[in-house]
Structures are given as C-alpha cells and as structure tokens.
Amino acid sequence: MQHRRADRRSYLDLPPSAETVIIGGGIVGVATAWTLRQRGIHSIIVEAADDIGIRTTAMSAHCIRAQFGEPDNIAMMAESLEFYEHFAERCGLPASNAGVNLLQQGYLFASTEKADRSAFEDRVERQRQSGLDDVELLDGAEVQRRYPWLSNDIVTATFRGRDGWIQSDLAVEALAASAGVPIYLGVRVERIQVNTGRVQGIETSAGFVAAGIVVLAAGPFSRALSPVRLPIALWRRHRVIVGPNTAIPQSGPVTIDANTGAHWRPHKGGALMAWAHAEEDAEAAWPVDPDPGFTDLILAGEKGIGRLAPFWHDLAKRLSPGDISLTAGQYTMTPDHRPLIGPAPGTEGLFLNTGYSGHGIMGSPAGARILADIMVIGHDRGNTFSPSRFNGNTPQPDVEQVVL
C-alpha cells in the first residue's frame, strides 16, 4: 500500500492570501496544522528550509517523557505520549504501520547523592497525585539488578517504563500528510505585518501573503519574527551519536544523571547522548556550529555519561572519529521552561506556539491541541502556558525541567 505524502509546494506557488498561516515546518508547526484541520480550520505552512522537520526537530534526541514536576507539564506530556501510542490510528495509517517507531524502554533519573532521596520521593508523590501512578522510586541495588552496566555508586532513582523515544521524521511526515495542508518550502518570512494591533499577513522572500490569523511556530526564529517581545533565550544544545557497537546495551532506558544533566539512550545499535548546558544567549542561526570539544566532554569527562555508566570510559578510548557524529541545535528557553501557547499579547490574530525549552517533540501534540482549543473558543483563560503569564515576572523552573 502506498502511503500519502505531505503536500510539498514550491515558493513560486505561494498564494497571495490564506485563512491561516503557520510559520514553521518543524514538528510543532506541523502538529498545529494537523490539529487545526481536525477543528475545520484550514491553514498553510511556510517553511524557510527546503523540507519539513529537518532543522531543530531533526537535531533533537526524539525523547518522550511524562516525568515532570508540575501538574500542567505532566498533563501535557502524558497527553502527547498517549497520542504517539495511538499515532497510526490517529493519522489514518494502516494497522500494520509502525507509526512513529515508539520505543518505550523508560526514563531513568539516577543520583549518587543520598541527600537526593527525599527530593526524589517528593517528586514521585507529586507525579502520582497528577495521575502518573506507574512512576517507580528505586534504590541503587534495584537499579543495578535491572541495569547491571550502571554504576554501583547510584543510591536512588526514579523510573517510568512508558516513557521512551520516537522517530521524529516519521511523525512529521505522517502528520503533514494526514492534515493535507499545503506546505510552501524555501519561503523565508521577513516580517509579520501588523496594523493598529491587528495582524495583516506576512512579508516573505516570495512575496506578501494576506492573512487574518498567523501562528508563529518557528522555533529559534520565533523571537526575531515576533512583533511583540518574547521572553525566550536561545541556548546551543549538542548531540552526539555513536554508531553500532556490541559494547552498548540496547535494552536500556534513557539514562539521566540527575547530578550533572548528562544523558544517553540506545540508538540503532549504538547510542545517542546529549547535555543541556546553559549558554550565553545567542541569535537564531542555521546551521548551528557545535563545539568540537563537546564529544570528549560527554564521553570521557568526569561529569559525562561515564559517571553513571562506567563502560563508556573504556569504550570512548576505542572509538574512532568515524564512529561519532556531533551536531548542534538551539533550545528556545522561557524563564519557567514552559512553552508559549496562545494569543500574543496586544496583537489580534497572532498566536504563538513556541518556546518549548527543549521539549517540542514531547509536547507538540498536546500543545497543538491546547492552541486549537483556544483559537476555537476565542480566549485562553485558565491556560497556564499563556504568553501573557509573565508580566515582568521570571519564575524559576524545577531542576528536572532543565535536563532534557
């Protein structure tokens, strides 16, 4: 059976007007188009790259977890995970289709500090109160029993087996195809035109498109394109992929060092690893140049992934440059590390779906649903992700939100 493909179109065919324009063809923008279509709202997507989902989305770790600290984040990620669990059905794919190749091998947050036990207990209790009744609190002996390649220095951990990772390119393609939305590639948005507080359309490299509704879902480029100030900082985020190697266990979870933030997971016979470091705020860029020293830092550094998985220290010495791929992208960090979803303050017709702070793949299905509900209802009262929530305040995030 031949599967549908996304409706890709040339910038030369860009229409002069549209009911709704979505800026951004990553997973957030495509999920938004899909969800709006379910509500009967027709849109077009404009994307500066020459294909969908090949920039920030492609540079991610493709992970999904519901283990967060606050009820709204837990609810968002749990809803998104449930969407991915039933992805083929939602997108009208044949029953034999693997959907997004969801692998639910779990998320393990582990610590070598005895003092962290009480914080882990509190976190698990909050998660269970928010409906995550399958989160486990483990001691070091149980961690080693399940995953003997991990360090016996681990004294406490939390684990949820339903968490895992997906293949994001499959998700982007299937969502776009199922939505049937026209996607205009190679279209660089130069400005969102606003007159007397009302969106008029977008000025692009391929001409002006008149539109009464514009959804800004451009990831790192959202801040520069927004006619209103967005509380977003851009952090460079590195990713290392190690090719297939029999020394790398493939049955393990996403393993996160709760003391340092370094994390890794199995990946196609090898491994994918990352580390979210706060950096000086940068301008949006593509491509993003990685720091060549990052590979040694995460593979062989004393605070890297070998701290909790000692086999990496030996394996790192035996890897050749051809075994390793280093790339980088950008996180869109808000002050509380929650996304900006809803109407832009003071600009009628402009809606935001951005600022996911490294959790765009995790949260995009639920985030798109939240935005679509707001657009249909006509207000965002009660929406804890509202862009207007700051009003000069900069609340601090929970520590686990910074990790991945």
Image (spheres, rainbow, N blue to C red):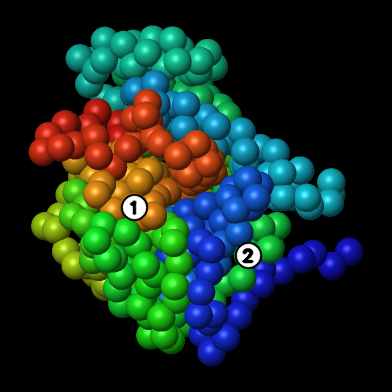
From the viewer's perspective, tell me whether residue 317 is left or right of residue 184. Answer: left
On-image quarter of the N terminus = bottom right
Q: Nearer the viewer, residue 116 or 74?
A: 74
Q: Nearer the viewer, residue 373 or 395?
A: 373
On-image quarter of the C terminus = top left
Using the numbered discs, state the Cα–Cα distance from disc 2 to disc 1 in whole angstroms: 23 Å
From the viewer's perspective, tell me whether residue 311 is left or right of residue 20. Answer: left
Q: Nearer the viewer, residue 189 or 39?
A: 39
Dot 1 amino acid type: Glu
- Residue 173 position in % (x across, y down): 63, 63
Residue for point 41% across, 85% down: 207
Q: Secondary structure at mark 1?
A: loop
Q: Which residue is mark 1?
A: 348
- 376 to 238, vertically: above or below: above
- Residue 99 position in % (x across, y down): 70, 50
Residue for point 47% across, 82% down: 186
Q: Secondary structure at mark 2?
A: loop
- Residue 319 position in % (x across, y down): 40, 64
Please name which of the two marks, 2 or 1, marks the residue nearer to the observer: 1
Q: Which mark is residue 203?
A: none
Residue for point 66% across, 72% down: 7
Q: Residues within 10 Å of mark 1 (few under 14, many from 20)?
A: some
State the residue lying farthest toward the bottom. 12
Choose top left, top right, bottom left or bottom right for residue 302. Answer: top left
Q: Which mark is residue 181?
A: 2
- 62 to 77, vertically: above or below: below
- 207 to 148, vertically: above or below: below
Q: Residues within 10 Å of mark 2 (few under 14, many from 20)?
A: many
Q: Are marks 2 and 1 in contact (CB under 8 Å)?
A: no
Q: Can residue 125 be seen in this snapshot?
A: yes
Choose top left, top right, bottom left or bottom right for residue 296. Answer: bottom left
State the residue lying farthest toward the front. 196
